[in-house]
Image (cartoon, rainbow, N blue to C red):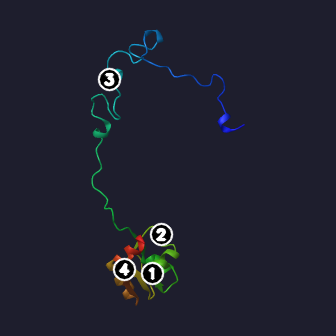
């Protein structure tokens, strides 16, 4: 048997009722729509509530907006850095250590906690306290240029 030879079982399909074809058809004159009113004459547009203020206009709208190219920073605290045994930290090392998620294109180092050894940290931004604590421990901070990082993220 081939697909074009398939047929539905007898009685499975019925012919559609043709409305508005004379009184003798059983669905003549008003064609089963009743008398008068909007539904008898035409279809009602989506969201129309009979003249009542529609729900879409009654409900308050959210204010503000999100900038289309906003920068999302993944934050890393100094207490997290002190737990990882490394002398240099960059975006790749932080991601490998599981301190930053991949979806964060930019990384900011925050000053919560303390660091007890000299480390070199490369990130897109530093808080003032983080910078002071790293340099006080004998380490260095390097800021990665944001424009090249944006190009790399889009790339």
Image: 44 above or below 124? above
Is any part of residue 92 visible from this angle?
Answer: yes
Can residue 108 be seen here? The reply is no
Give the mark nearest the N terminus, 3 or 2.
3
The local secondary structure at tag 2 comes to: loop
Residue closest to the eye, 20 or 4: 4
Badge 3: how crowded within 10 Å, few (<14), some, or many (20+)? Answer: few
Q: Residue furthest bottom?
A: 138
Q: CA distance from mark 4 to mark 1?
A: 15 Å
The residue singled out by tag 3 in the image is: 38
User: What is the CA distance from the residue labelled 4 to the residue labelled 3?
Assistant: 69 Å
Q: Tags 4 and 1 in contact by the CB under 8 Å rule? A: no
Q: Point out the residue furthest to the top here.
A: 24
Q: Position of residue 32 (x, y in %)?
A: 42, 17
Label at residue 114: none
In this view, the residue in front, 50 or 85, is 50
Q: Earlier in the sequence, mark 1 or mark 2?
A: 1
Which mark identifies residue 90? 1
* Residue 122: image location, x then y, percent: 41, 82
Q: Residue, x 66% and y 26% (percent of image)?
A: 9
Q: Earlier in the sequence, mark 3 or mark 1?
A: 3
Distance from label 3 to label 1 (Cα)? 68 Å
Q: CA distance from mark 3 to mark 2?
A: 56 Å
Q: Residue, x 39% and y 18% (percent of image)?
A: 33
Mark 2 vs 4, N-terminal side: 2
Classify mark 1: residues with Cα within 10 Å, few (<14), some (14-19) or many (20+): some
Which residue was labeled with disc 4?
130
Looking at the rendered structure, the secondary structure element under dot 1 is loop
């Amino acid at each position: 048997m081939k697909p074009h030879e398939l047929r539905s079982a007898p009685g499975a399909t019925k012919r559609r009722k043709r409305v508005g074809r004379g009184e003798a058809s059983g669905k003549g004159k008003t064609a089963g729509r009743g008398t008068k009113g909007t539904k008898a004459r035409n279809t009602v547009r989506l969201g129309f509530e009979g003249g009542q203020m529609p729900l879409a206009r009654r409900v308050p709208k959210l204010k503000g907006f999100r900038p289309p190219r906003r920068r999302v920073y993944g934050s890393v605290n100094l207490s997290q850095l002190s737990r990882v045994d490394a002398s240099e930290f960059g975006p790749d090392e932080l991601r490998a250590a599981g301190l930053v998620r991949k979806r964060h294109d930019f990384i900011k180092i925050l000053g919560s906690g303390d660091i007890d050894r000299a480390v070199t940290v490369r990130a897109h931004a530093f808080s003032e306290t983080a910078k002071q604590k790293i340099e006080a421990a004998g380490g260095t901070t390097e800021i990665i240029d944001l424009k090249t990082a944006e190009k790399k993220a889009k790339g």
